[in-house]
Image (tube, helix red, strand yellow):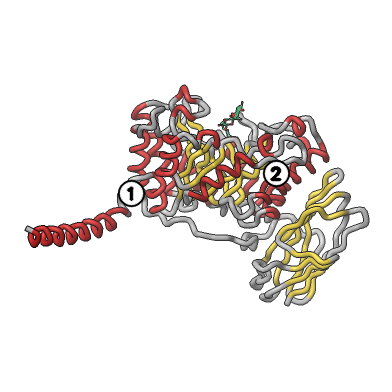
Amino acid sequence: MRRTRTRIAVVLAGTAALATAIGLASTAQAATTLGASAADKGRYFGTAVANYKLSDATYSGILDREFNMITPENEMKWDATEPNQGQFSYGSADAIVAHANAHGQRMRGHALAWYSQQPGWAQNMSGTALRNAMVNHITNVAGHYKGKIYAWDVVNEAFADGGSGGRRDSNLQRTGNDWIEVAFQTARAADPGAKLCYNDYNTDGINAKSTGVYNMVKDFKSRGVPIDCVGFQSHINSGSPLTSDYQANLQRFADLGVDVQITELDIAYSGTQQASAYATVTKACLAVSRCTGITVWGIRDSDSWRSSDNPLLFDGNGNKKAAYTSTLDALNGGSTSSPPPVSTSPSRSTSPSPSTSPSNPGGGQGCTATTSVNQWQGGFVVTVRVTAGSTINGWTVGLALPSGATVTNSWNVTRSGNNWSNVSYNGHVNAGQYTEFGFQGTGTAGTLTPTCSGS
Ligand code: G2I
């Protein structure tokens, strides 16, 4: 009897080993959770999370089983993180980050600069005071989370709805059209490792609004403004339906040299129509190699900001819906498009030089430096481009500011008086290529005459 049992046990063990081997082999084709399946395709699958729901076991059970990226639904917004000017409040957001760390999930940060959900004190500000408040806010919040955020929605919803293709009016917009690039430069300085995204809604197909954003991104890339990604919220409903050019729209942005992400997906259709639309969106992301992941805007229908539309993947009881299955199937059957390159990219760029000619050329051994200045009343941002004549491994730009101008913030550079030198990751510049650094200040930058010396 004992011998028989032993033999059965050995046979079973052998079978189990074989089954495990087969199971592992087939896992790559058919992962059983959204996060694992997306990971097999080099992508993430995330959700918006509300901190106060983490104590709900059904909610956190689904979260930790299915999702490997988290966006705080409200906890990192300006009103939550700086309720009084200069007083920062990170408790709820920190709790979400701690949950993510404990469960192997990464974080998307949302959102540093936005016309909505501003604290009352900021709503009442304008001009230079508001601009400075925005810069201070971004510096503090992105600095607090430095190294902990995969991607930040640096600027949210800055474009107008409708056919204008232009900017939305807001107190931030009225501080000057360059507020968006200042926000990106400030975020880069505060957390150089985070991908920096522009995020908006009704930009999910090719239309006037998305083309306005497209033109801004193209301009930013050509001038070296640090932007790494564009978020497409994808709040799909009958008034803002899923269009057949969804994938083409993602692709045209990716072709500008930015990652694309689906950031707040929910689909207010029902039944099979909803399931099929989720599959279409998922396949579109898989088909675009720079689409790095998908985030849904909540877990259960009851968690949604528009819960009466039942737009999510789980019903109010936490059961998987048809939309869940179609999404998972789409992930598992996803195209073989290569995953996006993994990069902790420095700012060096090989993109074509800007159309505007350099304002202040200056040269020395191995390199030249040029500046472009964005001046507004009371403040400025300077971008300095260092172009290598022959390949260099380090550089120093000599650049003096007029009296009365004070630097408050700089990025991709280390400064000693009037000498601005490379940091660890941007000293090496190949012949003919360039890298950029920048700084922000108060006062007037005036006409700058930089010199450059390479080593
Ligand atoms: O409106 C849907 C989303 C559009 N894109 C940007 C997202 O940040 C935005 O998320 C929603 C949240 O899902 C809501 O939860 O943003 C809303 C505010 O603009 C959030 O609603 C707010 C309520 O308006 C507040 O009354 C409430 O105090 O949620 C707050 C916290 O529960």
Query: Residue 281, image x and y in percent?
Result: 43, 40
Mark 2 crowd level (few <14, some 14–19, many ≥20, 10 Å Cα):
many
**In the image, what residue occupies the spot 25% across and 60% down?**
21
Amino acid under label 2? Ile
Q: Is residue 4 above or below residue 215?
A: below
The amino acid type, in three-letter code, at marker 1 is Ala
Read off the residue under disc 2: 180
User: Is residue 345 shown left or right of residue 141?
Assistant: left
Which quadrant does the N terminus fall into?
Answer: bottom left
Q: Which mark is residue 144?
A: none
Point out the residue furthest to the front here.
Answer: 2
In this rendering, position of residue 436 left or right of residue 313: right
Q: Quadrant of ligand 1?
A: top right
- Establish if 62 lies above or below 433: above
User: Can residue 205 be seen in the rendering of this structure?
Assistant: no
Image quarter hosting the C terminus: bottom right
Task: Residue 418: name its quadrant.
Answer: bottom right
Q: Position of residue 318 (x, y in %)?
A: 39, 32
Q: Nearer the viewer, mark 1 or mark 2?
A: 1
Residue of label 1? 31
Question: As rendered, which of 99 and 309 lies closer to the eye?
Answer: 99
Residue in view at x 36 percent, y 48 percent: 334
Task: Return the x and y of residue 51 as percentages of the image width and height.
Answer: 55, 37
Q: What kind of element bears circle 1?
A: loop
Q: Crowding near pointer 1: few (<14 within 10 Å), some, many (20+)?
A: some
